[in-house]
Amino acid sequence: MSKISFLLLWIPFISFSQGKDVLMYFKSKDSLVGVKDQNGKVIIPAQFRVYSVLEDGETVKGETIEFDGFKKDEVKEKNAWGYVYDKKGNFLYRPFLYDNGADYFSEGVRRFVKNGKVGFADRNGKTIIEAKHDFVSPFNYGYAAFCDGCDWEKTQDEHKAIVGGTWGVMNFKGEITQPVSIPENAVEVSGKFYPNPFKYNEKEKSILQFFEKQNKKLSEIYYVNWYNKLSGDEKKLFFEIVERPKENFPFYQVYTYDYRKIDGGLSFDFKFLVSEDGKKVFAQDYDVDKLPFDQWLKKEIKEAEAYQKEHPDNPNKLSK
């Protein structure tokens, strides 16, 4: 069976904030939620009904303040869920609604909604791509599909699907990108091929070389529980830098992609962080913020060996 994708929806946002101010959520008598600082000053008044488990006095984590719910007596906005503010209490954006909750971060950005249109913001709440399309998919391998004039329609199994409209593909700058005729070293999006979007300086190439040297072992670990037999070429993983050091985030973030150029870290354990000087490598782990790469690798090898022992007929074996 392939890696489980739904875990991504429950992954808490990782905090790398280096700010000294401590902010805390508080609850009013009627269970509305707001935020105070360590001195008791109200930063954001209690006005939100939240759905996540949140204790009175719980510390705000991350680079922004997030409310997983809605304002009391608000008028619902299409495709929006929750609210995001900066640490000073200034409103930033409303996340895009994804599977009964706020959209997740993919390749360093997440979708937000403004006036019914969809755009992208980074971990600091900065708008990276303005909201101007009716729908946009999450970024994968540097590209996102978008449509205008489309809408949601219920399917027979009560889920919703996007129908109609005019579709296109955008790059990470929000620019419309045209497909190429020769697919060599290109990326497939919706059945068409687009230029490889990743370019690196020498320092970044050396960072990725670390993962390339580990490719065989990492590929064996990743594919050990896949139900179908894969060739050597199909087992090859691809590593790309999807986020670079910025305010509150002193790391390069490296994503893992499978042979189809699809995000291979949906279960969270194949995403990595490299320190700004390129000397320290961490794996983003579900149980902790980040784990030194060597420790993570030993844990993953042990789990893969246990899986193979329990499933001796698995088609993708670990090497001896």
Image (spheres, grey):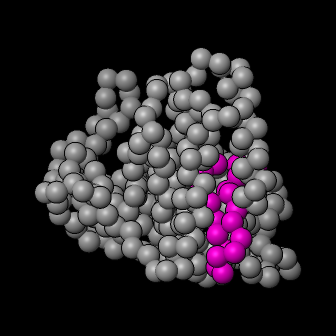
Q: Main secondary structure of the magenta part?
A: loop
Please, is residue 2 above or below residue 54 in the view? above
Find residue 39 and report its image quarter. Answer: bottom right
Q: Is residue 218 magenta?
A: no
Position of 124 with respect to 98 (left or right) is right
User: What residue is shown at x 58% (from left), y 78% (from top)?
Assistant: 245
The residue positioned farthest toward the front in the image shown: 320
Q: Position of residue 292 (x, y in %)?
A: 76, 60
Where the C terminus falls, by quadrant? top right
Find residue 271 and report its image quarter. Answer: bottom right
Q: Position of residue 290 (x, y in %)?
A: 73, 60
| Nearer to the camera, 30 or 282 | 282
User: What residue is shown at x 44% (from left), y 76% (from top)?
Assistant: 200
The residue positioned farthest toward the left in the image shown: 181
Magenta residues?
268-287
Q: Position of residue 219 (x, y in %)?
A: 55, 44
| Nearer to the camera, 309 or 275 | 309
User: What residue is shown at x 58% (from left), y 58% (from top)?
Assistant: 213
| Nearer to the camera, 243 or 114 | 243
Position of 180 with respect to 270 (left or right) is left
The residue positioned farthest toward the right in the image shown: 39
User: What residue is shown at x 33% (from left), y 58% (from top)?
Assistant: 144
The residue positioned farthest toward the top in the image shown: 313
The total number of labels drawn is: 0
